Amino acid sequence: MSTAAQPPLQSLPESDFGAFRQCTSMDRIHELLEHGFPWMFFPSDMEQQFQRDGAAARARRFLISGLISLFIYNGFLLADYLMARDVFWLAVELRLLVFTPISLLALYSFHKGALPWLRQAPPSIVDVLALLGGIGAAVSLAIILMLSRSPLIYFYPVGFMVVITYGNVVQRLRFWFAVVFTVVLLGTFVGGVMATPDFPARLLWPISSMVLSVAMFTLSANYFLERDERRRYLLTLRERGLVSELSLAHTRLREVSDIDALTGMHNRRHIQEHLSLLWERARRDGDHLSLLLVDIDHFKKFNERYGNPAGDACLQKVARVLQDSQRRTGDTVARYGGEEFMVVLPRTDASFAVGAAERIRQAVEALQIRHESSTTALHLTASVGVVSCQAGPQLTVEQVMAVAEQALQQAKLEGRNRVCGLSL
C-alpha cells in the first residue's frame, strides 16, 4: 500500500488529545491569573511541577545565602562581646563550635547529596533546612539572653529581628514555612525574654513591638514575593502554552497544505519536496528511481459534457485506483495538478516501472466510467509517461521531470490510453 493512501492527517486524533489537555491546562492558568491564589497553593499537579521547576534555583540561593548568613551570624560575636561580655566565651562556643560546624556539614551534605535521603528528598527540603537553621540561630540567642547578667543584655533581643529577616526575606521560605518559622521565632523570643531575670518593663513593649513589627513586615514581604514568583511562573506557563498552540497550528497547517482537498492524497507541493529528498538519497546510494506521470485522457471534454461535480467524482475514483495500485510502502502517489497524477517509485528499474504503469492504465480503464466525448474510447482512459534512471551526479531531478513530461506527451501523440517509457 502506498504511503499516499495513509495521509498524515491520520495522526491528528492524538494531536487533538494533546491539544485538549493543553487547552485544559491553559484554562486553569487563565483562571489562576484572573482570580489569584490567596492560599499560596496551585492545584496539586501544578503545585508539584512548580516546586520541581524552582528547586534548582532555590537550592542555589539556599547554599549562597546560607554561607553569607553564617558569616554574618558569626560576625555578631562583636555584639556578644559588647552586650554580653560575661558569657562571651559561651557565645563563642555556641556560634563557632556548635552552630557553625553543624551548619557547614548540612550545607556541604546538601550540596554534594552525600546523604541518601537528601538525593530523593522533595524540593521542600530546602525550606526545612533553612527553617531549622533559623530556629537554631534563634535558640542560641535565647540561651545567651537568659544566661547573661550584663546591664546591656536587655537590648539583645533585637537580634531576633535579624534572624526573622533571614528566614522570611533572605532565604525566602515558602509562605507557610515562613508562617511556622515566624511563630516559632516569636515564641522563642517571648520565652527568652520571660526567662531573663528582671527584664525592665519599660523596655519590654518597645523591643517586643519592634520584633513583632519586623515579623509582620517580613512575613508580608514574603507573601508578596512568593505571590509574584507564582504569578511569573503562571505567565511563563501561559507563554509556553501559546507557543505550543502556535506550533501545533503550524504543524496542522503544514499537513493540510500538503494534502489535496478533493482527493485526500498528497498534492504537487508535497510530491516535489518528497521527490527531491528521494533523489538525493538515490544519488548518494547509486540507486534506481522511476517516475510516472498519469493523465486522464480528454478530461476537459468530460467536464464540459457531464459537469464539474461528475468530474470531481471521476478524479476521486481515479485517485483511489492509483492508491490501490501501489504495492510497496515506499511508493508515493499524488495529485500533480488538474487531471494529472504523479507516482514516485524509489529503487525501481524500467521493467518494473512500466509494469506498474500498465496496471494503472488497466485499472483506470476497468472503472468503465462512460466518456462519450472522448475520441479515444467510449469510457474513461489514461495515458502514462514513465522515466527510469540510475541517480548520479550528472543528472538532476529537474531533468528527470522533463523526461517524464516528454514520455507522457509521447503517449498522447501515439493515440493515448497507453504507456510510454523513456530512460536516462
Image: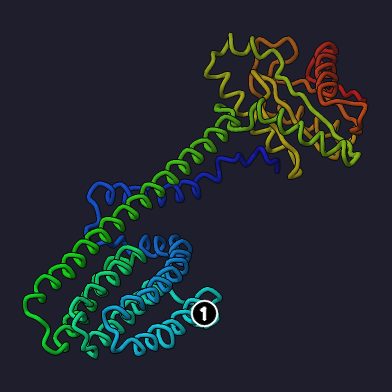
Residue situated in front as seen by the camera: 29 or 191? 191
Instruction: Return the residue found at the far left.
Output: 202
Q: Residue sitting at 93 percent across and 26 percent down?
A: 394
Residue 177 seen from this side: no
Residue situated in front as seen by the camera: 143 or 166? 143
> Image check: 72 left or right of 403?
left
Residue 383, image quadrant: top right
What residue sits right under mark 1 in the picture? Answer: 109
* Above or below, comparing residue 275 to residue 327 in the picture: above
* Above or below, comparing residue 65 to residue 225 in the picture: below
Residue 42, image quadrant: bottom left
Where residue 254 sits in the image (x, y, percent)?
57, 33
Q: Residue sitting at 35 percent across and 62 percent down?
A: 47
Query: Considering the image in quadrants, where does the N terminus appear?
Result: top right
Residue 316 seen from this side: yes
Q: Residue sitting at 66 percent across and 14 percent down?
A: 299
Query: Considering the image in quadrants, where does the C terminus appear?
Result: top right
Residue type pointed to by label 1:
Ser
Residue 193, image quadrant: bottom left
Where residue 50 sits in the image (x, y, percent)?
39, 60
Where residue 60 sits in the image (x, y, percent)?
48, 64
> Image check: 288 left or right of 100?
right
Secondary structure state at the residue bearing disc 1: helix
User: Dot 1 surroundings within 10 Å: few (below 14), some, or many (20 or more)?
Assistant: some
Residue situated in front as seen by the camera: 377 or 166? 166
* Above or below, comparing residue 97 to residue 57 in the picture: below
